[in-house]
Image (cartoon, grey):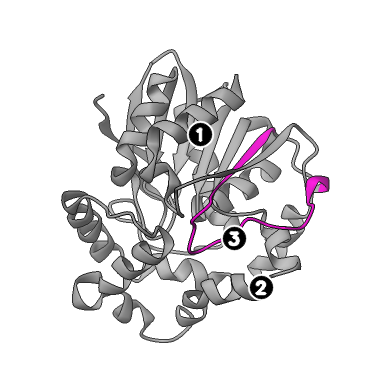
Amino acid sequence: MEFEHVTFDLPHGTFHALQGGDPDGRPTVVLHGFPDHPLTAKPFLAELARHGRRVLAPWLRGYAPSPTAGPFDFASLTGDVLALIDRWSPGRAVELVGHDWGALITYDTVVTAPERIERAVTLAVPHPITFLSRPRLAQLRRIWYMGLFQLPGSGWMASARDLAFIDRLWRQWSPGFSLDPALQAELHEHLRASMPAPIKYYREMMRPGMIGATRRLSQPIEVPLLQLYGADDGCFLPPKVDDRHRFAAPHAMEIVPDVGHFLHIEAPEAIAKRIAAWAN
């Protein structure tokens, strides 16, 4: 299935995206995470399209060829997504699917503007307040890189030796999975043009703007939401606490066997099928 490269002139600049699928289908926006971009997920986007969706997958702020200038606080990132939705799907609420940082933005978007989101899916990342309230030691060990990214020069470290650090994260987070070499080279090209902006997301988490985001995210989610986790995820563990009180609309959580952190890239057909079955 063919996807075209499109652009949108938004308040923060010109944002780039992949677009494809049924022109009359359910509008679905897919947000990538770190360290990733839309092109690695094309098979997943195509599977969503085969399930009757019109799909848009943008390069987020900080990821070339979209604007790489900050700020990178939640309000700004969510504002980009809502501006994009208003341009791409005026008058019709969208299905929002987010992976990793895209999932965090999804959680914030559904509490900021629930009327613009028909339903949502988060991949690999628990509700932020659930994650922050009772972090497990095993989980803290897996996110050591977040501390590293607070250090001066961490952008250089992430880019050194042809992004060897980034490749290491992919291997750790999705054990047993190898990204196609052509896709990996394409990802490297875009990340080299983006650094150190993607790392600044993590630095923004330590700044005062996070207080406002925490207040918003403390509100019950009033949009139907599906959470999917890979059973072999080397980055995030599914939460063991009961956080059903955070969801005031239909909600489901599933752990998908035999996939890791990049579950939608490892098993695009299976993940798209689960999303379609839940949404119908």
Residue 237's mark? 3
Q: Secondary structure at mark 1?
A: helix
Q: Which mark is residue 208?
A: 2
Residue at x 54%, y 55% (from the top left corner): 76
Image mark count: 3
Q: Is residue 195 visible?
A: no
In the rendered image, the quadrant that contains the C terminus is top right
Q: Are marks 2 and 3 in contact (CB under 8 Å)?
A: no
- Magenta stretch, main secondary structure, is loop
The answer to whether marks 1 and 3 mark residues whose Cβ atoms lie closer than 8 Å is no
Q: Earlier in the sequence, mark 1 or mark 3?
A: 1
Label 3, residues with CA under 10 Å away: few <14, some 14-19, many ≥20: many
Taking depth in this image into account, of 47 and 254 the one nearest to the observer is 254
Residue in view at x 40 percent, y 57 percent: 174
Q: Determine whether label 1 and label 2 are within 8 Å by CB.
A: no
The boundaries of the magenta stretch are 224-245
Residue 1: x %, y % from top left: 26, 24
Sequence-earlier tag: 2 or 3: 2
On screen, 157 above or below 119? below
Q: Quickly name the residue at label 1.
A: 85
Q: Secondary structure at mark 2?
A: loop
Instruction: Out of 8 and 109, give the one closest to the viewer.
Output: 109
- Nearer to us of marks 1 and 3 is 3
Residue furthest out toward the right: 245
Question: Label 2 to label 3, Cα distance in Å?
Answer: 27 Å
Gap in Å between the C-alphas at discs 1 and 3? Answer: 30 Å
| Residue type, label 2 | Pro
Disc on the earlier residue, 1 or 2? 1
Residue 142 coordinates in the image, percent (x, y): 52, 72
In this picture, residue 180 sits left or right of residue 115 = left
What's the distance in space between the residues labelled 1 and 2, CA to CA? Answer: 27 Å
Q: Is residue 225 left or right of residue 122?
A: right
